[in-house]
Every structure is written in C-alpha cells, then in structure tokens.
Amino acid sequence: MTPNPDVQTSPHADLTAQKEPLSNEPPLKAPLSNEPLFKTLSLGFAALDAGLRRDGSPEDQFPVPGLDLLRGSGFWGAGGDTALTGPQLLRLMRLVGRASLPLGRLFEGHVNALALISAYGTAGQRARTAQEVREGRLFGVWNTEGPDGVQLLGASSDVRSDTSSDPGGLTLQGAKTFASGGLQVTRPLLPVDRQGERQLVLLRADAPESVAREVPGSWQPLGMAATGSVKLDFSGSRVEQDDLIGRPGDYYRQPMFSAGALRFCAVQQGGAERLLDEARAYLHRLGRGHDEVQALRFAGCWTGLQGAALLLAEGERLERACLAGKVSEARLLAQVDAVRLATEDACLALLEASERAVGARGLLEPEPFSRLIRDLRMYLRQPAPDAARLRLGHWVMNDWLLGEWSLDEGSLDESGSEDD
Ligand SMILES: Cc1cc2nc3c(=O)[nH]c(=O)nc-3n(C[C@H](O)[C@H](O)[C@H](O)COP(=O)(O)OP(=O)(O)OC[C@H]3O[C@@H](n4cnc5c(N)ncnc54)[C@H](O)[C@@H]3O)c2cc1C
C-alpha cells in the first residue's frame, strides 16, 4: 500500500544536523540544566489546569494561556538552534501532551517548523527566526492538502539561484487543510509544489503581501477543536526569495522526515498517560480504586503505554546513532514505525478501557473524560497508519536480523550517543 499523495504527513527534521554558527544574536540556549525549567513548567501547567477546572472553558477555545506559559518557559525555541537535546525534547513534548493535547499539537507544529528551519535554513534565515522566536511568534508546518494544494508559481527552474529582486515574481496558489493554529500562526512553514518537487516556504502570514482566507466550516472535528486546524486558501500570496527554506526536496529528506513522528508520539503518549491518571483518580473518588475488574483492565493499559514509551526512548537513541552513521536508516525507520504502531495500539486500548471504566456518568461534563477521549482519538489519526504497519511487517519478515534485537548484549551501550 502506498500513502495517499493527497494527504501527507507533518514534518520533521533532525535535531543534530551540523549547522553554520549563527551571527552575534543573543543565544536561544536553555541553561545547562533544564531541570528547574521543567519543574516550573509542570507547576505552571498544574496551576492552569486548576484554573480551567474551576472556571471551565469552551472546548474550541484556542489555548492562549498554555501557549503564553510555553513562551515564558525557556523552551519556546525548542527544536531549533537550542541546546535542548533529543531526550529532553521528547520529555518536553510528553509533558505538554499531559497538560493538553490541543496545546501539544500546536507546540509540536511550532517545534517541527523550528527544526526544519534549523536544519535547512541559511544563517540569515536562522538568525531572523531566532529573533522571531524571542518575540514570541508562533510557527507551524502545514503540509496536508487536498487536490487544490498549494503551488509556487513564477519560479525559475532553480528558485534559489533566481536573483530576481522582484517579490511579485513568486506567488502561491491553492489551499492547505488541517492548518493547526490557523490565522494565529504568524510564521507557517508551507511545503508547496514547485514543478513537481516540494519546496518549503516560510510565510510572513501577518504581512500585507500574504493572503490566508479561512474556508468556513472546514474544522468541525470529533476532537482537538481548540487547535483551530482549519482549511486556508493562500491564493495570491506574494513570496520573496528569502522566504524559501532549503532546496526543493529537502522536506522529504530521510531520516528526518519520518523520524519526526517520534515527537507526535511523545505528545500522544503524554495525553494517554494523563487519561490513565484521571481514570484512576475518578475510580478512587467512586471508592472503586481497589476493584479487581478495573485493576485487571488497567494492568494491560499501563503495560502497553510503558512499552510504547520505551520503544520511543530507543527510537530517539537510534535516531542519534543513525545521524552519527552507526545505525542504518532502515533500522531507524523500522523503529519509528514500531513506535507509531505501539503508540496507536496502546492509546486505542486505553481509550476503550477508560470508556468502560468510567461509564456513562464519567462521560458527562464537567468530568474531563469526554474531552480527553475525543482529543486523543482525533490526534491519533496520523497519515498512512496502515502503510507504516505494513512497512514494519515487511522489514521484520525480510530485513530484521536476530542478532540486532534491542536488548542483546552491547546494543544498549552508548554507541549512539552524540558525545562520543
Ligand atoms: C488535530 C489535527 C491537527 C493537524 N494539524 C496538521 C498541521 O498543522 N499540518 C499538517 O500538515 N497536517 C496536520 N494534520 C494532518 C495530519 O498530519 C494527517 O495528514 C492527517 O491527520 C491524516 O489523516 P487521515 O487519518 O485521513 O490519514 P490517511 O493517511 O488518509 O489514513 C486514513 C485511512 O486511509 C488509508 N489510506 C491512506 N492512504 C491510502 C491509500 N493510498 N490507499 C488506500 N488506503 C489508504 C489508511 O490506511 C487509513 O485507514 C492534523 C491532523 C489532526 C487530526
């Protein structure tokens, strides 16, 4: 099975690619130890949550307070030219997912965009991005589209060598679907079609030369309503040469493109862990915390989530090993597919168990379950899930070697570490 070309995944870049140094701009680096930042962010999320539980909020309300908390957390530049390493980045994604899946999806898009700009942008583009991150701008990556997808028009055969200074020379035509954050995202990164290849365009969405018309009624989802993932039509937007990030085709470069799935899996796992914690607390409030049926139910859920979390941690380690040339790309991509599979299966099993455990009463507002369940169900729908499962199956049948099992002697040493 081949992935549907009309519905493509969000995007991704490696965190450790070699980069030119930035100019003299103040660094975006987080402090050497991020522990105090993580602690402060956790406390901030807990306070936000308490406020929301007290005051309530419409389900489709854009998560401004959560984004503001992240803006002030020291992590707003995560994924870009920061000192945040892979394991810490995934820890951050998991933490945000526990707080709120819509917030996690928006932050994931922001991080994905910064990672792509960091990997493929010029020093000047990265410096400008660093400045815009300091200003608190929200970035995103909008790749998904239907048959009326976005094209870059007026491009010469090599856009980046086209020295024309006429900004009217390049325009966009077409629309994106599932544009998380919609018009709140002032720096969306658009992979667009340029003569059959994918070119990244960093749109200055709040500039007069940009056009982004929301298609009414395009976002009436099962869950994740607060992400405002609308359809936007960009026809008529003018683009400058300096808005083009990287070369045509960079967006799909592997292993970065597929390995970015580790980040959405981390957010989803965080949301699932939250659901498990809430369901357990609810049962305790009902005096059913020691009920044997519920205990049996959640034993499997916890094990599934823990397994997915460990596969994810191993995936991150293999990503670093692959970038260091110590593990093949095929091995890494098989692991990424395994993380996707395990995450989806564990989350779906938990959704089923939670619904059965809390029952109809638990699914009434103001209990959190209906929202948590719908958000997780919706966010789990990622591109071509069955193709990923099938690809993994073929790899297991044809390429996996018995001696390359993750827990075999020597396979868990630090050979994949960036430091050695
Ligand atoms: C809350 C939310 C926010 C999002 N935000 C963004 C965003 O900001 N930017 C962005 O780019 N995207 C975004 N997306 C889109 C996302 O990345 C995926 O593209 C989208 O969710 C995939 O949708 P789908 O389930 O229809 O996938 P599909 O890949 O179409 O899968 C649906 C079904 O179709 C089957 N299928 C797929 N391809 C084929 C085929 N060729 N032949 C036969 N069967 C096939 C699959 O096996 C599966 O059963 C968002 C999605 C959600 C849910």
Image (cartoon, rainbow, N blue to C red):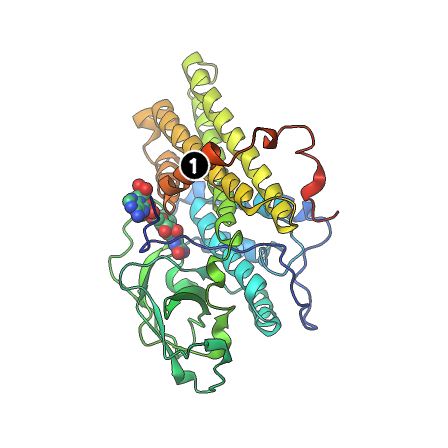
Q: Nearer the viewer, residue 367 or 244?
A: 244
> Would you identify the image quadrant in which residue 45 lies?
top right
User: Is 359 located above or below residue 218 in the figure?
Assistant: above
**Looking at the figure, which quarter contains the N terminus?**
top left
Question: Residue visible at 73% across and 52% down?
Answer: 32
User: Is 388 located above or below residue 81 in the figure?
Assistant: above
Q: How many marks?
A: 1
User: Residue 353, image x and y in percent?
Assistant: 38, 25
Question: Counting other residues with Cα less than 10 Å from the Cα at mark 1, is it few (<14), some (14-19), or many (20 or more)?
Answer: few
Q: Nearer the viewer, residue 97 or 79?
A: 79
| Farthest-out residue, top | 292
Q: Classify mark 1: helix, strand or loop.
A: helix
User: Residue 297, image x and y in percent?
Assistant: 42, 19
> Would you identify the image quadrant in which residue 131 lies?
bottom right
Residue indicated by mark 1: 394
Identify residue type, mark 1.
His
Question: Residue visible at 63% across and 61% down?
Answer: 81
Quick check: 261 left or right of 193? Answer: right
Quick check: 124 left or right of 349? Answer: right
User: Is 195 located above or below residue 403 in the figure?
Assistant: below
User: Residue 9, image x and y in percent?
Assistant: 40, 52
User: Residue 323, image x and y in percent?
Assistant: 62, 51
Quick check: 153 left or right of 28? Answer: left
Q: Nearer the viewer, residue 92 or 387?
A: 387
- Visible residue check, residue 29: yes
